[in-house]
Amino acid sequence: MAKRIEIIMGGSGGQGVVLAGQILGKAVAYEGRKVLQTQSYGAEARGSLARSEVIISENPIGFPAVRKCDILVAMNQESLNANLHYLKDDGLLIVDSTNVQEIPETKAKIYKVPITETCKKMFGEATYANMMMLGVLTKLTKLVSDETMKKVIEEVVPAKTLSANLKAFEKGQELI
C-alpha cells in the first residue's frame, strides 16, 4: 500500500455516500491502519451534492482534507463534474454509469459500472446502491478485505436490511 491514499466518494444526498465512507473508514481502522473520514453535504437532506472523503495512511494524518485524490467514486454526473479536478492523473475513477453519461477527458483509469441500474433490477429500488458501490471499490482496490468490510456492514446497518445490504455488496464485487 502507498504511504497515503486519498479517496472521494460523491453523489446526491440520499445515495448513501456518507454512510459508505463511514463504513470504509471503520473497516480500514479495524485492519490497523490510520484513517480519517469526513463528509459534506448540502442543506437539503436529499438531492443536494454529498461527499465523503477517506484518507488512509501508514503515518499520522496531519492534514484532514483531500488535496488530490487517488480514487474518485462518482455516483452521479454532478458529483463527477464537481470533483474530477481533485483526481490525480494516474488515479482511479469509478462511475455509476446509470447516472453518469459524460466523462470529461482524464488520464485516470476509468471503470463504468451500472450500479443503480443493477440495484433497481435486484431490489426494485436504488436504496442499496451505496453497498453495491462498496463492493465494486473493495474488489478493484483491495484496500480492505471482504471479510472486514462485511463485518463492518453487519455492525452498521439495521438488522432488518442486513441481508439486502450484504447481497448488494456481493453483487458489486461480481460486477467487476
Image (cartoon, helix red, strand yellow):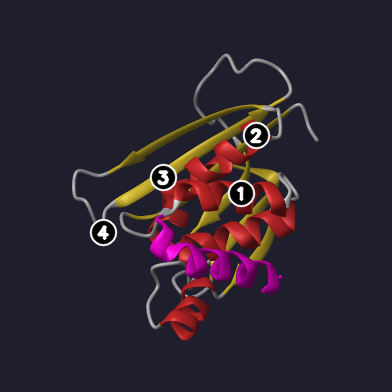
Separation of marks 1 and 3 at Cα, in angstroms? 24 Å
Query: Sequence order check: which comes first, mark 1 or mark 2?
Result: 2
Q: Residue at x 54, y 18 (%)?
A: 63
The kind of secondary structure element at disc 1 is helix
Q: For the residue marked with disc 3, what is the amino acid?
A: Arg
The kind of secondary structure element at disc 2 is helix
Task: Give residue 35's position: percent from left, percent from top.
Answer: 60, 28
84 to the left or right of 99: right
Q: Which residue is mark 3?
A: 51
Query: Sequence order check: which comes first, mark 1 or mark 4?
Result: 4
Q: Which residue is mark 2?
A: 30
- Foreground disc of the pair 1, 3: 1
Numbered range of the magenta stretch: 158-176
Q: Which residue is mark 4?
A: 47
Q: Which residue is mark 1?
A: 151
Query: Sequence order check: which comes first, mark 2 or mark 4?
Result: 2
Of residues 1 and 92, the one drawn nearer to the viewer in this rendering: 1
Q: Quick one: quadrant of the C terminus?
A: bottom right
Give neighbour class at mark 3: few <14, some 14-19, many 20+ (Cα, 10 Å). Answer: many
Q: Tell me the quarter of the picture where residue 73 sits.
A: bottom right
Separation of marks 2 and 3 at Cα, in angstroms? 23 Å
